[in-house]
Image (cartoon, rainbow, N blue to C red):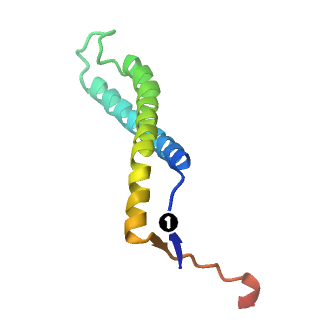
Amino acid sequence: MLKIRKLGILKMALFSGLFSFFIGLISAILIWAFWAVLAGLLISIPEGTSLSPVSFSLINLILFPLIYGILGFIFGLIFTPIMNLVFKIIGGLDIIIEEPEEASATQ
């Protein structure tokens, strides 16, 4: 059994930011799909209004992932020292790592 006693603040913030970026990208795609379906159902909407999925998609697909990524990085910078303090108090985080069985051992 291995223990994690401390996390690197910058590496954890980068991980958190990148992870949040991808969550933002998935959210943006789902929201764009929702607006596209909604606009397709509401045929009586005049063209060029703010409900158009094409006009919404540029803002959605660019800004959401960037905002999520930046906020994830900032929260990673804030919460990683707190996690390290908790790890110090509780004695670390236990992790069990198993080595895969070798293919030659089964033959």
Q: Which of 8 and 1 is in front in this view?
A: 8
Could you say whether the residue bearing mark 1 is in a helix, strand or loop?
loop
Amino acid type at mark 1: Arg
In the rendering, at what x and y percent does residue 2 appear? Answer: 54, 75
Q: Nearer the viewer, residue 75 or 42?
A: 75
Residue 89 falls in image quadrant: bottom left
50 above or below 76? above
Residue 105 falls in image quadrant: bottom right
Q: How crowded is mark 1: few (under 14 residues within 10 Å), some or many (20 or more)?
A: some
In the rendering, at what x and y percent does residue 53 appear? Answer: 36, 22
Q: Which residue is drawn at 26% across and 27% down?
A: 41
38 above or below 24? above
User: Which quadrant, please, contains the C terminus?
Assistant: bottom right
Q: Which residue is drawn at 73% across and 82% down?
A: 103
Q: Which residue is drawn at 45% across and 28% down?
A: 61
**What residue is pinned by disc 1?**
5
Q: Residue at x 33, y 18 (%)?
A: 52
Left or right: 12, with 33 as reference point: right
Q: How many marks?
A: 1
Q: Nearer the viewer, residue 53 or 42?
A: 53
In the rendering, at what x and y percent does residue 99 appear? Answer: 63, 79
In the rendering, at what x and y percent does residue 77 appear? Answer: 45, 43
Residue 104 falls in image quadrant: bottom right
Left or right: 56, with 97 as reference point: left
